Amino acid sequence: MSMDFIIAAIITVVGISTPILLAGLGELVVEKSGVLNLGVEGMMLIGAIAGFAVTSMTFNPWLGIMGAAVAGAASALLFGFFVLTLNSNQVATGLALTIFGTGLSSLIGLSFVGRIVPQFGSIFPPELARDPLLKVIFGYSPVVYLALVMVLAVAWFLKSTRAGLILRAVGENDLSAHSIGYSVVGVRYAAVAFGGAMAGIGGAYFSMVITPMWAERMTAGRGWIALALVVFAGWRAGRLLTGAYFFGLLMALELYAKAAGFSILPSQFWAAMPYLMTVVVLALISMRERIGSNAPACLGKPFLPAT
Amino acid sequence: MAILTRRNFLAAAGAAASLPLIGSPALAQEKIKVGFVFLGPIGDYGWTWAHNKGREALQSALGDKVETVYVENVAEDASAIPVMRDLAQQGCKLIFTTSYGYMDQTVQVASEFPDVKFEHCTGFKRADNVSTYNSRFHEGRAVLGTIAGKMSTSGTLGYLGSYKVPEVVLGVNSFILAAQRQNPNATLKLVFIDSWFDPPKEAAATETLINLGCDIVTTHTDSPAALQILEQKGLHGFGQGADMSSFAPNAHLTAIEDIWGPYYIERAQALLDGSWVSADSWEGIKEGTVVISSYNPAIPADVVALAEEVKNGYAAQTFDIFTGPIYDNEGTLRVKDGEIMPLSDLAVMDWFVKGVESAA
């Protein structure tokens, strides 16, 4: 296994992992605030078509990414309205958002089929970005670095800021947070919007970076993997990063094994791996109290103050 | 009250029940409905896009007598059955199911609707009202393989497959056999991604094949994703189902285009004439269902000449890539020297030729 091979393999893994990392980060913040948003797949698709459409019309990928974030946030706020203001069931509404997002993105995407868009240039100088060895650090799309920066930002936000503390409080015990005087619904709206924006950018990664085109359902179920990833990571941003790259590695391993000519396990098993790993982690969490569960105590429960 | 006796009531109800018959329109020449079940979105710019183009050709040729309807994104599992039933119940008299994975569902629904004609694409199960139709894509693959064999510098070719079904196996074998006629040491790495359409996975699989030494990758999946990766890396590939050069102007050498229009028109006309019978249609370059799109100017003229020779050979039916001796990838001689494999064997081919490195 030469250096070139390892570098190329790493680059492939990073490419596979980044969208689920982005969507997972967003969902982590949402779930930390106590809301369970199952609509990640739909939001990713909306972000994918929005990003593609804006880039196609403005020829500027940065505007495209912003458009994807805004569109993702908007669809999430729609979800938020039903779940936070109307107190509808979070699971059902989230699934509805997935179906809605898939359909809406297909509808809007009809006029964008067959088009190609300009891509991001590298943010590092070509000597670094194209260097055969250093490209493993400097050669990625700006969105990859954005994802890494966001991991740090989210971790710092949750752990070291007052706002992050409030968000965690709202997710752990909404009635106490409410009685202290914090707006539970307000905090949750903000978290949901952030989650939607991140999922939108994650989706746009598909239509703007991996394969710069629009095709219906092009996220192909990665939103569900992002959901599993949040659980797998135990609602911790650092573990989310390793988890995302681990899932990406599993998906790449499956392809490498097949292409190299041996199948260790049937391919359907590989496809189920991320979810199987998540179930294993869940079992471990419930068995060993020392690991404990980091699940926010109010996850999925509507906020219904007595007053 | 005397008016509402049981007898009066029954008489009035009987009269009322006959009202709809008065209102029915005169049975003028009604359009025949033709239904299409599509695997992917018509915007996939590949397989389903080509079938849809065929449907549009049918609509414009016979639009005064025929009305077409279609359903996209129908999965290749039990959920296809209600879709097919629904089309039949809507009044479709001819239904085309355009993917291998609809085989058993088509046969089942056809048994429930004996008056409706079904045509299953790329399958092999027939009935009185079920026809099969296919295209000899492998003839196109032979042209592609010829080009790949000549132009590959590493001698390792990549094939992005979907499922291990006869159509794909044929494509793989045809491609590498043709390449080996130009470069006897050419080998092929094959990945099945278990999907006909999954752009991110197609992209990742293409990267994997490239990383394992392939410098030309051809795809049997439906999106241009593989070509985009090849374009990024400065390598080459081929379009599948349609000319995909707009997605990869430098990487796209040529493409196999699927032309279904004439077949659909012919079968719909047969239905209208009352001459439709269950048949197995397997046309190719000669009949025009497989078309090779224009060649990338970067291909040297001598390579184009070789490719054209293969293509013309198929058009004149003087050439067949599956002419022996052919060994399988375990070393057994499967086709003797000079023998040509009959189409019936090709239809159920499940073994790979020498030079194919596959996990399956």
Image (cartoon, coloured by chain):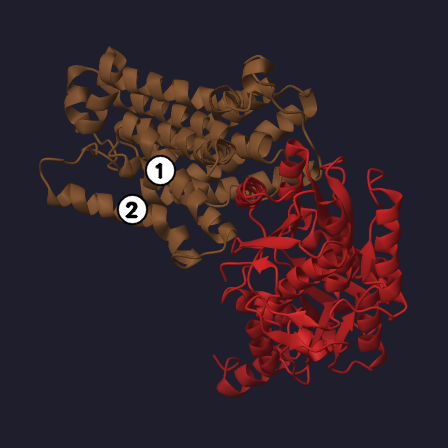
Chain colours: A brown, B red
Residue at the image position 47 percent from the left and 47 percent from the top: A256
Any part of residue B122 in sight: yes
Q: Is residue A37 above or below residue B283?
A: above
What's the chain of the residue with tag 1?
A: A
Mark 2–mark 1 Cα distance, whole angstroms, equals 10 Å
Query: What x and y, as percent, mark residue A175?
Result: 16, 26
Residue at the image position 81 percent from the left and 63 percent from the top: B289
Quadrant in the rendering for residue A183: top left
Number of marks present in the image shown: 2
User: What amino acid does circle 1 point to?
Assistant: Phe
> What crowding class fits label 2: few (fewer than 14 Cα within 10 Å), some (14-19), or many (20 or more)?
some
Q: Nearer the viewer, residue B170 or B98?
A: B170
Taking the image as shown, residue A246 lies to the left or right of residue A292, namely right
Q: Which residue is tagged 2?
A: A277
Foreground disc of the pair 2, 1: 1
Q: Nearer the viewer, residue A290 or A25?
A: A290
Q: Nearer the viewer, residue B148 or B247?
A: B148
Taking the image as shown, residue A39 lies to the left or right of residue A33, namely right
Same subunit, labels 2 and 1: the answer reads: yes
SS under mark 2: helix
Quadrant in the rendering for residue B93: bottom right
Residue at the image position 80 percent from the left and 59 percent from the top: B259
Q: Which residue is tagged 1?
A: A246
Query: What x and y, as percent, mark residue B154?
Result: 65, 44
User: What amino acid does circle 2 point to?
Assistant: Met
Taking the image as shown, residue B73 lies to the left or right of residue A196, namely right
Query: What x and y, as percent, mark residue A212?
Result: 62, 33
Q: Is residue A35 above or below residue B24?
A: above
Tags 2 and 1 in contact by the CB under 8 Å rule? yes
Q: Which sits earlier in the primary sequence, circle 2 or circle 1?
A: 1
SS under mark 1: helix
